[in-house]
Image (cartoon, rainbow, N blue to C red):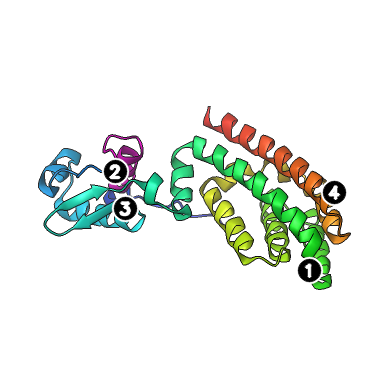
Amino acid sequence: MATESIPRQTVVDLLEARLRDDILSGTHPPGSLLPPERELAAGYGVTRTTLKHALSRLEQAGLLSTRHGVGTRIRDFLRVGGADLLPMLASQDSGWLVDVFEVRRHVGVLIARRAAIRRTARQARRLAELLESVGAADDADIAQLADAEVHRELARSTGNRVYLLLTNTLFNAYLPVRGALRAPFEDPAEAAAQLGPLVRAVIDRKPQDAERAAEKYLRGTEKVMLGALGRRSR
């Protein structure tokens, strides 16, 4: 039987995580300069080379900015950051995940209505196929991924590419904890039955029915997934 290898954390990985936690918790507040590298490395008990690698990663993630002759400053990510930060933030603080799911629900309802108005015949056929793949999934993991493809196709059916990018962004935001959010998909046939009214309303071009079905489905799965995540964290 194939087994999944356990990732090995390096000192750089551990330092990156520690610095990230300290930044997000306010130990290093937004707008402040980090101490000089020699002092910072000594404070964390690492070499300056290790520190440089960790700082480089955090700069690429959008939490830091470095200017020659000035130093490394903590970015005010709530003011200047973008949605690309969501996976990192959601993996560190479940409060961010709650916010992600709220936006998922609001955007999903808009997408459902617009998809019911604009979907093409080809997209209707594709939605039916994808719904069937949810019910035919061999396990919860496959069903969960199939469900994601349904929502991507719904977003694509709006004819607005920004909705598709928003959908991808929201999925990416909870990707780091996806394994803890499989509860609604443990019974793939039931998962497909719950999703069915939304897909059929879009196929049948019934915008109001699609809105109601999307609200019910997204609110229901949100409650189950966040409940499972909460039990796991206790």
Front one among 79 and 84: 79
- Compared across the picture, whether 118 is left or right of 60 comes to right
Q: Which mark is residue 135?
A: none
Disc with the residue nearer the chain's start (2 vs 1) = 2
- For label 2, the residue is 19
Predominant SS of the magenta segment: helix
- For label 1, the residue is 123
Image position, residue 208 (x, y; %): 83, 49
Q: Secondary structure at mark 3?
A: helix
User: Which amino acid type corresponds to the residue marked 4 in the rendered image?
Assistant: Asp
Q: Which mark is residue 58?
A: 3
Pair 4/3: label in front: 4
How far is mark 3 from mark 2, CA to CA? Answer: 8 Å
Vertical placement of residue 30 versus 145, above or below = above
Disc with the residue nearer the chain's start (1 vs 4) = 1
Check whether the beta carbons of the residues at disc 4 and disc 3 lie within 8 A of each other: no
- Which region of the structure is painted magenta? 14-29
- Point out the residue furthest to the top here: 234
